[in-house]
Image (cartoon, coloured by chain):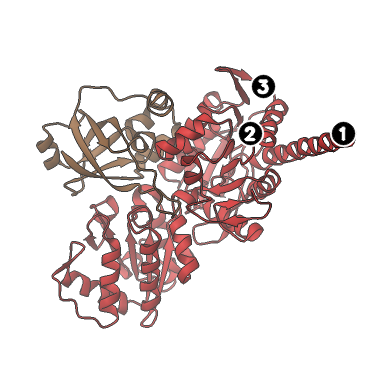
Chain colours: A brown, B red
């Protein structure tokens, strides 16, 4: 399914970040994406299923969570290395990359969510 | 020991009313802080889970070394580099940033702070059209219309609404939130939007159009379209009326504006809207700054070099051209051959292409906490947590400098960012002098 990807801070991602980047609470709150109930139905997934997000910059597996907000067609990922694996790097000469509004394809997957270190080794160093 | 009026060094709100109870150099109780802030205080005091020894990585092996050895290695990397990047500088004190400027100047590198991926576009916009702003104290005492645009403070600045903008009673706002109106403009109904008096849902990436429509109506234009950027004509007229008729309005904006398409042009337009509004009433605009001292980082760089971020010293004098001299761009283009990353975690927060280059070059990570960037660094130096284990100066998001305090002792042998950067600066200076003398001696022999 085609969606628009946006990233941003969530409270629990902040708590996880302050608890430590290698902590479970960080992974539980950053290696996720928020999808609306209607979009979940369209994808044929339920909360807690893993999804693969693909953009022209890369792909990543994260856990799908139900969004309490109304934003059909938009998928929200907390900022962090999982989000950045599929974000663009063009800054349009404004220094800041476009972290919001990336076209993406999302699908259900059986693949596991990588830990922070595995993710960096596999997609950043070897990829 | 019970401390009052402690400053929390998490976000740009710099709450200065925290109460902390310390026993045997351990923080056992925290009052008033939000959960993110409290988490930082407890983590600092949890010595068992902190790395307190510097590390050097050689051939995939991790070796614990003394601080002096780590500083020696770090200076070697910087002195050997042709054009290093010195990045971060937002979750540390102004005193450390000052030595950072000296160091970057010495090694002919590029100094950039986290504003480059956050409010950098806002800074570009002020340079075009100015920044009609105020302090958070004025907001608390005077503001009757609060707008958050592309910002979700309940998640990113959890106490912003309760300390300054919406809930508190102020001198002219005696009844607190009953004397104020809260409007949220966002692409999704965020938790902040849910408590607002009004939520306006804008289509993703169309903020520029909405700002333009508001300015058009404000300046007497007649809107013929039924919807602009997904917002109905009635809502636009109603919003313009509210903005014109309030007595003190504030537009707080966040990453929703700076990181979407349009970037600095959208901010430029939003500032122009606020400027236009000042023909009718008193209106202000303010950036929702993330890192607790990212404002201070811009201030120190600006007063030392004339530029607030993305400053390149490689020609021997400071030069500034975001897009060319900014951290993500120089990394993506592979233009830097070494790096020093302080008080920041670009491996977690930069796009993949930029991180890939960083992981290929030797770099030093200086941080109170071991993070994803530290995991792959050639040299990692732990430091004391500013505002908890050492003091210094930080700037709140409204540009008010606040002295952050020391309430517990850092782990043994762990120094502040300021001291570590100063040591690296002095050592690098020695190395560069030695090299110049050696080269001069060789020339004499020839």
Query: Going by the picture, which residue comes out furthest to the front?
Result: B446
* In the displayed structure image, the side of residue B232 where residue B261 appears, left or right: right
Numbered mark located on residue B295 in the image: none
Examine the rendered structure and indicate whether residue B58 appears above or below residue A29. Answer: above
For label 2, count other residues whose C-alpha is less than 10 Å away and answer few (under 14), some (14-19) or many (20+).
Answer: many
**Image coords of residue B400 (percent x, y):** 55, 61
User: Do marks 3 and 1 both belong to one polypeptide chain?
Assistant: yes
Report, in whole angstroms, how far the alpha carbon at label 2 lies from the one at label 3: 18 Å
Q: Which quadrant: the C terminus of chain A?
A: top left
User: Residue at position x 38%, y 63% from top?
Assistant: B265
Which of the pair B335/B274 is nearer the observer? B335
Image mark 3: chain: B
Q: Is mark 2 on a helix, strand or loop?
A: loop
Image mark 2: chain: B
Q: Can residue B131 be seen in this view?
A: no
Q: Say which quarter of the image contains residue B426.
A: top right
Q: Say which quarter of the image contains residue B387.
A: top right
Report, in whole angstroms, how far the alpha carbon at label 2 lies from the one at label 1: 52 Å
* In the displayed structure image, the side of residue A6 where residue B373 appears, left or right: right
**Image coords of residue B263 (percent x, y):** 37, 58
Q: Mark 2 points at which residue?
A: B410
Q: Name the residue under label 3.
A: B65
Image mark 1: chain: B
Q: Nearer the viewer's eye, disc 2 or disc 1? A: 1
For label 3, count other residues whose C-alpha is less than 10 Å away and answer few (under 14), some (14-19) or many (20+).
Answer: some
């Amino acid at each position: 399914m085609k969606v628009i990807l946006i990233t941003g801070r969530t409270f629990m991602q902040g708590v996880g970040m302050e608890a430590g980047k290698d902590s479970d609470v960080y992974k539980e709150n950053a290696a996720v994406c928020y999808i609306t109930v209607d979009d979940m139905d369209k994808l044929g997934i339920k909360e807690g299923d893993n999804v693969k997000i693909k953009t022209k910059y890369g792909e990543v597996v994260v856990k799908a969570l139900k969004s309490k907000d109304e934003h059909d067609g938009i998928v929200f990922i907390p900022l962090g290395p999982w989000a950045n694996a599929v974000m663009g790097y063009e800054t349009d000469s404004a220094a800041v990359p476009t972290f919001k509004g990336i076209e993406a394809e999302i699908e259900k997957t059986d693949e596991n969510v990588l830990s922070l270190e595995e993710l960096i080794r596999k997609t950043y160093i070897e990829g | 020991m019970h401390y009052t009026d402690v400053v929390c060094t998490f976000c740009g709100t710099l709450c200065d009313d925290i109460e902390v109870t310390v026993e045997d150099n351990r923080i056992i109780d925290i009052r008033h802080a939000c959960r993110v802030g409290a988490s930082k205080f407890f983590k600092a005091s949890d010595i068992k889970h902190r790395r307190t020894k510097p590390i050097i990585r050689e051939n995939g092996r991790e070796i614990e070394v003394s601080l002096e050895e780590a500083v020696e290695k770090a200076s070697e990397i910087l002195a050997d580099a042709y054009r290093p990047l010195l990045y971060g500088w937002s979750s540390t004190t102004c005193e450390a940033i000052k030595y950072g400027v000296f160091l970057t100047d010495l090694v002919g590198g590029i100094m950039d702070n986290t504003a480059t991926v956050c409010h950098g576009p806002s800074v570009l916009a002020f340079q075009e059209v100015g920044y009609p702003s105020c302090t958070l104290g004025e907001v608390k005492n005077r503001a009757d219309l609060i707008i958050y645009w592309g910002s979700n403070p309940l998640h990113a600045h959890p106490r912003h609404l309760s300390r300054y903008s919406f809930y508190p009673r102020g001198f002219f706002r005696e009844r607190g939130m009953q004397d104020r109106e809260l409007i949220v403009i966002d692409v999704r109904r965020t938790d902040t939007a849910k408590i607002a008096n009004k939520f306006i849902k804008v289509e993703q990436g169309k903020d520029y159009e909405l700002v333009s429509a508001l300015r058009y109506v404000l300046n007497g234009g007649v809107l013929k379209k039924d919807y602009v950027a997904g917002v109905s004509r009635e809502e636009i007229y109603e919003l313009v009326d509210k903005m014109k008729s309030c007595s003190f309005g504030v537009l707080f904006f966040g990453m929703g504006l700076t990181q979407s398409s349009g970037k600095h042009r959208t901010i430029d337009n939003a500032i122009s809207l606020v400027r236009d509004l000042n023909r009718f009433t008193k209106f202000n605009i303010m950036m929702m700054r993330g890192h607790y001292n990212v404002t201070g980082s811009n201030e120190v760089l600006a007063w030392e070099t004339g530029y607030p971020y993305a400053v390149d010293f490689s020609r021997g004098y400071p030069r500034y051209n975001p897009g060319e001299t900014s951290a993500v761009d120089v990394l993506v283009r592979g233009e830097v051959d070494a790096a020093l990353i302080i008080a920041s975690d670009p491996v977690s927060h930069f796009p993949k292409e930029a991180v890939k280059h960083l992981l290929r070059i030797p770099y030093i990570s200086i941080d109170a906490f071991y993070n994803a960037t530290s995991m792959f660094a050639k040299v990692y130096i732990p430091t004391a947590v500013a505002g908890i284990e050492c003091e210094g100066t930080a700037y709140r998001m409204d540009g008010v400098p606040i002295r952050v305090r020391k309430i517990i002792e850092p782990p043994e042998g762990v120094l502040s960012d300021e001291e570590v950067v100063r040591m690296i600066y002095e050592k690098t200076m020695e190395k560069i002098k030695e090299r110049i003398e050696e080269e001069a001696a060789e020339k004499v022999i020839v």
